[in-house]
Amino acid sequence: MTTAVIEWNGGNGAPVVLPVLAPLGRDGLALTRPFGSDPADPHGSGSAGVAYIPRPLLVRWALEIVATCPEVGPVAVWPYGVAVEQTALALAVGGLLAAARPVGSVAPVVCAGRPPIRRSRPTASYDVRADVDGRRVELAVWEVFRFARPAAVTGLAAGRAA
């Protein structure tokens, strides 16, 4: 079990247990808990779940998974070549983000480094510093959001069929 203390520009230092991940060897997603796990158990089966997803679909599927399968918790987009430790830290930051939000909020989608998306998709970048078993690690963790429609457009479209 690896522990870390994470500090970031969105929150204070917090001790966390990093999820257990194994290298994927290709593009995929890391889920805080496996599909079908008990959402009341914060650690699920004790290890993160993974899903192998082709790169063009990574972000779209991650956003769909957190919206339709809340039991998995935060999801990390994991492009091929990103280190296991960086993805584990990103997933832990996703857990800290989720804990700071109202109960019932959709879990965050995060990525260790710039996610493979169009620049028009809304994102936020967090500068993360972590003490991982006595080692200092620094990285940028990106959060990816669904496209949001302005309130004026949403109100106008409400009365129309799509």
Image (spheres, rainbow, N blue to C red):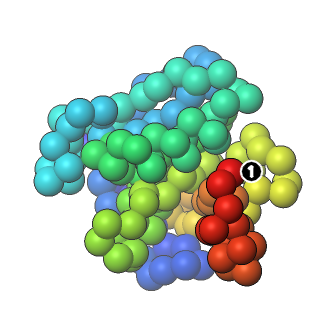
The reply, left or right, for residue 17 in relation to residue 124 is: left
Give percent across and percent down for residue 64: 52, 42
Where residue 15 sits, quadrant-wise, is bottom left
What is the residue that sits farthest to the right in this orientation? 119
The reply, left or right, for residue 85 in relation to residue 34 is: right
Q: Residue at x 62, y 68 (%)?
A: 158
What is the residue that sits farthest to the top in this orientation? 25
The type of residue carrying mark 1 is Arg
Q: Residue at x 67, y 71 (%)?
A: 154
Q: Quadrant of the N terminus?
A: top left
Asked if residue 137 can be seen in this view, the reply is yes
Residue 120 position (above or below residue 54): below
Circle 1 residues within 10 Å: few <14, some 14–19, many ≥20: some
Q: Residue at x 74, y 50 (%)?
A: 114
Q: For this rendering, which residue is in front, 21 or 62?
A: 62
Residue of label 1: 114
Give percent across and percent down for residue 141: 62, 58
Q: For this rendering, which residue is in front, 62 or 129?
A: 62
The reply, left or right, for residue 10 in relation to residue 66 is: right
Q: How many marks?
A: 1
Residue 154 position (above or below residue 65): below
Asked if residue 141 can be seen in this view, the reply is no
Give percent across and percent down for residue 22: 43, 26
The local secondary structure at tag 1 comes to loop
Q: For this rendering, which residue is in front, 27 or 129?
A: 27
Q: Residue at x 56, y 67 (%)?
A: 129
Q: For this rendering, which residue is in front, 134 or 120?
A: 120
Give percent across and percent down for residue 89: 48, 52
